[in-house]
Amino acid sequence: MSKPLNIGMIGYGFMGRAHSNAYRKVNNFFDLAYHPVLKAVCARDEAKAREFAQRWGYESVETDWRKIVERKDIDAVDICVPNNLHKEISIACARAGKMVLCEKPLSMDTAEGEEMCAAVEQAGVPNMVWYNYRRVPAVTMARKLIEEGRLGRIFHYRAQFLQDWTISTDLPQGGTALWRLDAAAAGSGVTGDLLAHCIDTALWLNGSIDNVTAMTETFIKERKHNLTGKVEKVGIDDACAFLARFQNGSLAIFESTRYARGHKALYTFEINGEKASIRWDLHDLHRLEYFDHRDESKLRAWRSIHVTDHGGEHPYMDKWWVPGLQIGYEHSFVHQVADFLDALAKGVPAEPTFRSALETQKVCDAVLKSAASGQWVSVR
Amino acid sequence: MSKPLNIGMIGYGFMGRAHSNAYRKVNNFFDLAYHPVLKAVCARDEAKAREFAQRWGYESVETDWRKIVERKDIDAVDICVPNNLHKEISIACARAGKMVLCEKPLSMDTAEGEEMCAAVEQAGVPNMVWYNYRRVPAVTMARKLIEEGRLGRIFHYRAQFLQDWTISTDLPQGGTALWRLDAAAAGSGVTGDLLAHCIDTALWLNGSIDNVTAMTETFIKERKHNLTGKVEKVGIDDACAFLARFQNGSLAIFESTRYARGHKALYTFEINGEKASIRWDLHDLHRLEYFDHRDESKLRAWRSIHVTDHGGEHPYMDKWWVPGLQIGYEHSFVHQVADFLDALAKGVPAEPTFRSALETQKVCDAVLKSAASGQWVSVR
Amino acid sequence: MSKPLNIGMIGYGFMGRAHSNAYRKVNNFFDLAYHPVLKAVCARDEAKAREFAQRWGYESVETDWRKIVERKDIDAVDICVPNNLHKEISIACARAGKMVLCEKPLSMDTAEGEEMCAAVEQAGVPNMVWYNYRRVPAVTMARKLIEEGRLGRIFHYRAQFLQDWTISTDLPQGGTALWRLDAAAAGSGVTGDLLAHCIDTALWLNGSIDNVTAMTETFIKERKHNLTGKVEKVGIDDACAFLARFQNGSLAIFESTRYARGHKALYTFEINGEKASIRWDLHDLHRLEYFDHRDESKLRAWRSIHVTDHGGEHPYMDKWWVPGLQIGYEHSFVHQVADFLDALAKGVPAEPTFRSALETQKVCDAVLKSAASGQWVSVR
Amino acid sequence: MSKPLNIGMIGYGFMGRAHSNAYRKVNNFFDLAYHPVLKAVCARDEAKAREFAQRWGYESVETDWRKIVERKDIDAVDICVPNNLHKEISIACARAGKMVLCEKPLSMDTAEGEEMCAAVEQAGVPNMVWYNYRRVPAVTMARKLIEEGRLGRIFHYRAQFLQDWTISTDLPQGGTALWRLDAAAAGSGVTGDLLAHCIDTALWLNGSIDNVTAMTETFIKERKHNLTGKVEKVGIDDACAFLARFQNGSLAIFESTRYARGHKALYTFEINGEKASIRWDLHDLHRLEYFDHRDESKLRAWRSIHVTDHGGEHPYMDKWWVPGLQIGYEHSFVHQVADFLDALAKGVPAEPTFRSALETQKVCDAVLKSAASGQWVSVR
C-alpha cells in the first residue's frame, strides 16, 4: 500500500489545473510508494477556491497562503502563483518544514533564487521546480541518447519558443489571467516565461552556458493596465533572442517571442553533434527527429520517431496505452509527479531542484543584462 | 450540483482502463449535470478485480457479471469484454433496465446486433457503442466542415487502419491479452477490430454504403493457441481490403492489416469533394489537413490545422489547456463520456447508439461475405 | 568521341517537349558512347512543327509521320502522339528497321500490344516505352533496396495517382490538348493514362499480378467534344480503383482519379515487407521514405531520405549538382535517355521494352474487364 | 527572331556548369529577345577547358582570362572563379565594355565591391550577381506576397544555411575543388559562401539591416593545405551566427555552419508579420509555407503550397511542365538568365546588380567585424 502525501495547492490558474490533474492521475498509471492527497487549495477569492476544490476534489480551502504553510496536515506545498510571490512563499514553506514544488521560473531574479535555495537547503526539505518539458518522453529520450554518447562532440544548439497571442494592441496587461504581461508580477516577459523553458532543457541536455549576447524588444509600448485601468508603459520584453557559447565549445542561438504569427506554442530545439543530430518540437511533442551519420550511407536520413513504443525503450510510455497512441501536454506533469514521488521514496532529490533551476535564472539575468548593455555577458 | 451516475464496469483490460480514466477525468474538465461514480468492477479473477478497483477507485468488485446486472446501486453497465460476450450481457442489462455502454464492435455479426438493438429499444434504456474516434477533435471538426457543406459533392472516400504487431510467427493466439487473434472470441480479425472503426467514421461522415467487394488474407496460417496449448489454424483475417460505393455516388477504398511494417496504429481517412478535401491520421491525431479549392488560386494548398485552438471553434478544446498544446488518444473517451452524460441530461440518444453501430456491423458482414465469395455484395 | 544517334520525333506536345529536353541535356551530364542528334520533328501542322523545331533545335520538319519512318538519316523514332496511333507507327518503324521509343501506354489494348511486340522483335530493333518514373532516383533506389532483399517477404503494395483537373463540367473532351479525355484517342481514362504508371512501377518492384477486381466511374457523363462541337457521352473512366493479388502472395490496392481535389499529380506507392517498408510520392519526388524493423528498437522510425547524395549510392545523383540540391520531374527522362544510350552501346535491351510494357497492358485490360463485369479477373 | 548574346565563361567548376546549363536551356522554355551563344570558356588548364567546351558546346577555349575580356566577339563575361579574382576581372570587363555576370559573393570585402560598382557604373555596362535563390519560384512568390502587403508590419526574420560537409578533420583546405575552405581565395568561410545568400534574400524581402552582433567559430583549427602540402592554420569561419535589427523595426537571427550533421544544403527563412507569416527551405524548394491570420479562425493553419501551378500565379512555372510536377535547383539559374535577357531587351538593370549585391557585402563585413570585436556594429 502506498503512503499518502498531503498536498496544499496555492493558486488555481492554468498551472493549478495542470498540477491537480497530474496528482489525480499519477497513481492510476504508475506504481509508486506515495499517493498525493489533495488536502487544500488556497485562493484569495473564497468562492473561486471553493469552485476549484469542488472540481478537483480538494478537501478544504484557504484564502491566506500562510494558512496552508501552517497546517499540520499538509506535507508538500505547490506554488502556482505569479513569480513575484515565489520567494516569500517558498521560504516560509522551507521554514515550516514543508516540501516545496514551485512553478517556473524559480524567482524574479538570481538574487531571490539564491535566498530560496539557501532556505530549502538549510531546512533540508525536498524541493522541485516545474520545468515539465524535461518529462515529455521524446525530450527524456533525447537526454538518454546524449548520455549514451551518440551525438559525439556537440557543435550547435538552437532553441526557440514562438507564440503569437499578444499581437493585438487591444490586449490589456496585468490582472488575473494576464499577470504574465505585467513586469511587476512576472519579472520579465518572454525571457522568464518562455526562454526559461528553453534554457532549462538546454542546460540539462548540453551543460553550462558561459556567456551570451542578447537583444530584446517591446513591440507594443503601451497597454491598458487591468489593475489600474490606465494606459501604462509595457515593462516586459515581447521578444528576446540571444547568442551563447556553451562550456563544451558549442555555439547556440535562443529565441522567444509572442509575435510570431502562426505559432501557438512552438517550443523547438535542435542539437548538432559530430556523429548525430536531434530535434524536437512541442507542436508534435510525441515525435523525436534523429539523424545518425553512422547509418549506412545511402539510408542516412532524419528519422521521425513516434515515441509511443513499449518495452521500456520509450520513456514513460509503457505506463500508458498501446504503441502508436499518443499522449499529450498534460502527461509531462504526470511524469514529473511520478518522478518526484519516486525520488521521495528513494530519498534522493527530484530534478530540477531549486539549485538546478537557479542556473536557468542566472542565464536569464545575463540575457537581460546583455540586452540592456549591448555587451557579451558572462553567466558566472 | 451534478447528479451521480453509478457505473458497473465489466472487464479490466485495455478498454477498461481507457473508460475508467475517462469517467474519472470528465468532471474535472466538463461542466455536466451528471458525474460518474465508479461503483463496481467485475472480473472472473477476484485478485485482478481487486487490483483494478484499487488502482482506479472502484468501490467494490464482482466476479460474475450477472451480479453487476442485478445490483440495484448500478445505473449503467460498461461492457469491456471480448466480442462474443457482448450480446448476452447487453440483453441482460436491457432487461434489467440498465443503461448499456458497449465496446465496439457491437456484436459478432448482424444477427446478434439486431437482437441487441431490439432489446435496448424495447427496454428503452440509453445505449451507446464506444466508437471513440468520432470524438477526436479533428475528426469531430471534419464532420462539422462536411455538415456546413464545404466539400460539395463527394467523389472519393478512402480509409486505412495499419498495424504491424502480429508479423512474428511466434505470437500465439487466444487467451487474456490476445483474444483479438482468436476467431471464437473476436468474430473476425482486422475487419471487426480495425475496419469497424474506419466504417463507423465513414458512415458518420459520408452516409450509407451500398455495396462492396473485398479480399481478406491470413498470412500466418497456424499459431499456438494460448488456451489449448496446441498449434491451431488461425481463423481470423490478418488483412482485409475492400472497394465500396456509397449511396451519395462516391467511390471508396478501405484497407486494414496487422502486417504493415512501420505502422503502429495508423488510422487514416481522406475525403475528396468537389470543392474541398479533408484528411486525418491517428498518428498525429491533433491535426486536420484541409484543402479548399475556393481559396485564392496562388495560395491554394493543404493546410495542416493544429486543432488546439479555443473560442469554441475547435471541438472540445476549450475544456483543456491553452492553444498549441495537444491532447492525446485518451481524450477521445473523455469526450464520449461527456457527450453521453450531456445527452442523458437532455433525454436524447448518445451517438453512436446500438442502432447506429448496427450499420457498421452490416458493412462488416457484407465485406466478409464478399471476401468469401469473390462477388460484389449489397449491404442491405 | 561519342557517336551520333539521329532522332526523329513524332509529336510536339507535353511529351515531345519532355523528351526533347532530355535528348539535349543528356550528354552535358552523362558520359556516353552515343549522343542524340535532333534530326527532324513531325507534326501535321507545318507552322507548329517549324516553331517546335526552332525552339528545340531540330534540323528539319515533316508533316507526315511516314516520311520520318522512311528517312535514311534517322536512326530512332520517338512516338509522342495519342495512343490510338502507337501501333501503326511502331510497326512501320520496326519494318523500316528504326529503333522505337514509344510513349506510354504501349497501346490501346493487349491485342494491339502483342502485334507491336511481334513487330519490333521480328525486326530486332531496340525498343523502349517511356515509363519514366522508374528513373526517378528515389524510385530506382527503392528497386535496389528490394533487390538487396531488405524488405523480406512482401505483404502489401499500394499505389495511387490522384489528380483534380477534370472536375469542372465546362471542360470539353477531345482535340489537341485534351485527347486524353477522348476514349477514341486514349483508349481509356485514368486506367491507361495514370494507373499504367502505377502498374509499371509495381510490376518492376513487386513482380507479376495474378488477378484483380476493379470499379470505374465516369462522374461527368457528357461533355462538349472539341472535334465535333457537340455535347457527347464521355467514354473514358474518370476514376478507377482495384484490388489485386500478386504472384508473391502480397495484397494490393491501386487507385487513380482526376477528381481528388487538392492533388495535382500525386503518384504514391508504399510497400510493406516483413522486415522493412518503403514509400514514395511524386509531389516530393526527391525523397524516399524507409522504415527498417532491424533498426535498434528505440530508434525505429520512418526515415525521410533526401535522395541527393553523391558517391554512387543515390542513383544518378553523382551526375548532377552537389548533395542536398534537388532535381525535378524532367530529370527522369534524362536518365531514361542515358540508360537507353548506355544499353545501346552494350547491345542489351533498355527497360521497359515493348514486351515488358505489354505486361502493364494486360493488367489494364483485366482491370477494365473486371470493372465491366464485377468479377475478379485473372491477368493471364 | 531573337538576337545572339555571346558569352565568355571564365571558370569551369560547379558554377560554371550551373550557368552553362542555364544558358543552353533558357530559350527552350522562355520566349526572349536574346539567346545566349556559348562563345568561349576560359581555364588555365587547356585540357580541362577543352573538355568543358566539348561537353557544354562552347565554340572555343582560352587559358588566360584577359583574352576573354579582349575578344571582340564576346558580349558578356561570366565570372565563375574564386572570390579573390572577382575584382580584377570585373573591372577589366567593365573597362572593355563587356557586360559582367559575377558569381556571388560580389567581392572579398566592401572596399573591393565599391571599386567594382564604380567600374561597371562608370562604364555603363549591364551587370548582375548570381544570387540565384531569388529566382526559386517559391522565393519569388514570397516576395510578391510581401509586396502585396499581406504580411503587414514585420516583427521577425530568421534564416539559416546549414551544411555538414567539413566535419571530418581529414578534409584538406585550398586548391581546385576546396578553395572555399581557403581564406586567401574565399575571403571568409560560411559568411561569404552561405550567409551571403541568406542576407541577399533578406535584404530583398525585408529591406535594410541597421546593425548586428555576431559570433564565429572555427571548430577545426588546422588542416592540411592542398597547395602547400603543409598543415596550416584554418583562416575561415566554420560557423557564424548573428542577431540583427532591420530598419523596419523587425528583429532577426541568421546562422550558418558546415557542422550541422544531417543537413546538406538546408537554407531556410521565415518571416513573421502582423497578419501573416512565410517560411521556405531549400531541401523542398518547390514548396512555400504560408500562414494567414485573416483566414477563418477554425481553418487557420500553415499551408504547404506546392508552387507548381500554372496560369501565371506561381512565378515562372507556366514555362515548365504541368501542375504538380516539380522543378529543381538548376532552374533558379535558368530563371536568372531569362530575367537578365529580358532586362537587357528592356534596357533596365537586372537585379541584383553589383550595387545591390554590395549591400550584402556591407552586412558581411559588419558581421565579421562584430565577431572579432564582440560589439554591436552598424552596417552603415
Image (cartoon, coloured by chain):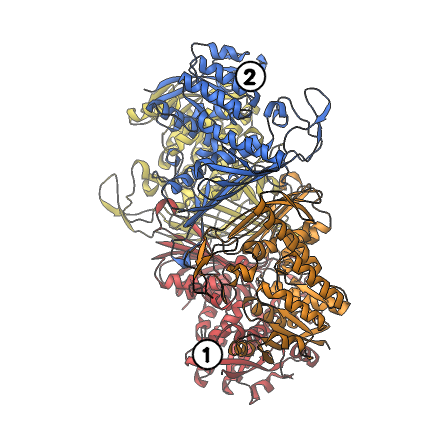
Chain colours: A yellow, B blue, C orange, D red
Check if mark 1's residue and mark 2's residue have beta carbons within 8 Å: no
Quadrant of the frame with the N terminus of chain C = bottom right
As drawn, A371 above or below B376: below
SS type, badge 1:
helix
Residue A245 can be seen in this image: no
* In this rendering, the label closer to the viewer, 1 or 2: 2
Pointer 2 residue:
B51
Residue B164 can be seen in this image: yes
At a point 71% along the width and 47% down the height, the residue shown is C150
Residue B179 % position (x, y): 62, 24
What amino acid is found at the position of numbered circle 1 in the picture? Cys
Give the side of residue D371 with respect to residue C354, left or right: left
Specify the quadrant of the image occupied by residue A37: top left
Residue A363 % position (x, y): 46, 45
Closer to the camera, A32 or C59?
C59
Give the side of residue B105 with respect to residue B226, left or right: left
Pointer 1 residue:
D117
SS type, badge 2:
helix
At a point 39% along the width and 65% down the height, the residue shown is D207
Specify the quadrant of the image occupied by residue D57: bottom right
At a point 55% along the width and 19% down the height, the residue shown is B85
> Label 2 neighbourhood size at 10 Å, few (<14), some (14-19), many (20+)?
some
